[in-house]
Amino acid sequence: MQALCTKTLAFTFALLFLPALAFAQTGQIAGTVFDDRGEPLPGANVVLQGTTAGAAVQPDGAFLIEEAPVGQQVLVASILGYETARQEVAVEEGETVHIIFRLVEQPIEISEIVVERVMLTGGRRGLDEIPGSAHYLGPRELEKFSYSDVHRVLASVPGVYVQEEDGYGLRPNIGLRGTGSERSAKITVMEDGVLIAPAPYAAPSAYYFPTVGRMQAVEVRKGSSQVKYGPYTTGGALNLISTQIPNEFSGRADVLAGEHDARTIHASVGDAFEHVGFLLETYQAQTAGFKHLDNGGETGFDKKDYLAKLRFNTSPTARVYQALTFKFGYVDETSDETYLGLTEGDFARTPFRRYAGSQEDVMQTEHRQYQVRHLIRPTRFLDVTTTLYRTEFARNWYKLDKVRAAEGGGSVSIASLLDDPTTYAAEYALVTGQGGPTGNALEVKANNRAYYAQGVQSVAGFQFDTPGLKHDLEVGLRYHVDEIDRFQWVDLYQMQDGLMTLAEAGEPGTESNRVEQAKALAAFAQGRAEIGRLLVVPGVRFEHITLDRRDYGKNDPGRTTTGDFRQNEVDVWIPGVGLDYRLTDAVSVFTGVHKGFSPPGSQEGTKPEASVNYELGGRFRQAGMRAEAVAFFNDYSNLLGADLNAAGGTGTGDQFNGGAVDVRGLELAFAYDLGRLARTRFSLPLHLAYTFTEAEFQRGFESEFEPWGTVQAGDALPYLPKHQFAAGLGLDAHRFGIDLSARYVSRIRTVAGQGDFVPAETIGAHFVVDLSADVRVMRYASLFASVRNLTDEVYAVARRPAGLRPGLPRAFLVGIKTRF
């Protein structure tokens, strides 16, 4: 019996401990992970395939797996935005195997040769091959702060001007190289290489903007070589790259929460097999808002964004490679936002106040996008990428528009009464909830609009190599149709004891009641020739645009008549050429000239915006250091301004000729890892950017466009800062990272003028600092924290649409990020 017990114990011991002893036969795997330019890739994951053993890559690119099972293993290295790499290793007991990975950048999930067909830059490695100014913010840059506000994302890019409005970037105002920033209407905005503004030709004001928080990368391209990305070619183009279908099963789940009941969820999952791949993603954000509404109420937003992709493809080694990708997106947003700002005195006392007169204001939007993209490479020197697309956008911004203090009296716009609350004291009292009941005093307008845009675009690329000359050719064709349907009305409210009650409901269609449509046929051809150290990129674009408007008027809500019809037609050739000469392997200079163009509206007599644009620059890249300096000059023969509510106008959307304007500036950028100087394993990335801009009207005129008004020769353009500066500094260690971002914007005029700044027509300078930190608690999970506006600076961002508006105050955000 005793012998039986002894044998049983021995057998049990063997079952329990022999596997552990076997697993104890381990070795180590040490190595480095770099990109294809030799730069380290901190944060990349290295794992032994089929096991849980792995390590995260440190700031200097190094990794160490201490307990790797002996035998033949497959080591896998991966990071978002790069191709996954695998290497076979033989692990021996007690020995250390050394491995080097070089991951190839893959900013999109299609073949490398056609990246430029749908991207502006081709990723980080493509920046040095562009004869002009271009910037790429990849996954690593976007992850540092997890911004959901595109204004903050773009602050680090020189030559970009942003005007905040609501503190969250819901309706961005972005300009490039001196273009107007109102609703980003003067730049070409794309998602995955496709026009994404609701109606980019008929009504370019972008009341919808893609959710930057769900993007994998952001690209900005300026200069001559961006003429192929029309229709807006003066300042440049902005492309947002959505999360791509991964090469293997992977995903993320980020959960963040913060002040003002802020909550953000970002989750995705995807996989790829030999002939099919998919991606599912959602980005959801909400907050109660940072402004304080008289008598209480929320001033924030609730936004839900969903994306799905499905790809079918042949084998990558097939003689004729093809891929077909379906993309569907849906966004729903409700935001308690208003055009009603504050008077000068109220902003000084309580900058985050919201008047009682805005308590009913709310923006409701719904956006859908459909896309089918086909890629074929019938031969090694030819590829064709064709995309069918459609977007639908419905929005109703229900907001206070005008006030009348007496029955039968005239109405006063909210912009006028906030500019002069003394003259309009009675109206001001109503807006602020004072006084007794006054019937039909508050005019709340339902700015109801429905948009669609659809089209087909195809780009063919040809690659030729001849002795002593490498040259490529791209040709593209796009047919596009878009439309905006305004069907609006006004409800009348009364104010009593600070509360608004509906007095008279308006009839839909009795305010703005019109349909505008644009049809555009565009074609481009762009060559690329490398002759020794010289790169030449000539290009030309053609646009044939027909714009029309049918106005049914306020007395025909049923649209029973044909209405008033007007039409404008434009044909334009847009040439450009860029040159880049490589002085050494580290230094190059570039220059370019191109025609700037913006389509006119449907109003008769309005000319297209036209300019001739020049740039001259140089760049340096060596041992992890990057520097770039660019001087630019835009010679406008005719600048256009648009009558928008967002710009303090009446909201007709009509465009006005502004005549000759000169815009000149300087852009500087510098980036380096200071950790290399100290020869430490810590990474200390530094980034600096500066923009100088001067823009002046060259002749005097009277304008119906309110921000211009009476213009004299030499007047500066409004809402264009002379100086902008941005700086970023980080500390990346093995298990934690800290990043600091700062930006300075000099004072700006809000009305065209010259000489001394008028306080009532000025927005003061401001300096804002953001801080973020993350701590890796597991290989696939990290804790994240950030502070927007670290010093809690109180600053104004605009005097439009009506009154002064504050920037975001200090706001904390914390949470957990996971990757799998």
Image (cartoon, rainbow, N blue to C red):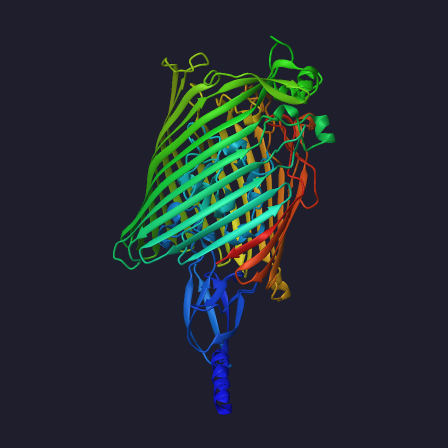
**Which residue occupies 57% across, 37% down?**
162
Q: Nearer the viewer, residue 74 or 793?
A: 74
Residue reaching furthest to the right: 349
**Which residue occupies 58% across, 38% down?**
168
Give how far across and how far down residue 177 sits, in percent: 53, 38
Give how far across and how far down residue 506 sits, in percent: 51, 16
Give how far across and how far down residue 272 sits, in percent: 37, 56
**Which residue occupies 49% across, 82% down?**
12
Vertical comparison of 261 with 96: above or below: above
Residue 132 visible (yes or no): no
Vertical comparison of 744 with 51: above or below: above
**Which residue occupies 40% across, 31% down?**
452
Residue 300 visible (yes or no): yes
Give how far across and how far down residue 481 sits, in percent: 36, 30
Q: How many marks?
A: 0
In the image: residue 196, left or right of residue 810? left
Q: Nearer the viewer, residue 817 or 238?
A: 817
Q: Nearer the viewer, residue 7 or 234?
A: 7
Residue reaching furthest to the top: 408
Residue reaching furthest to the bottom: 3
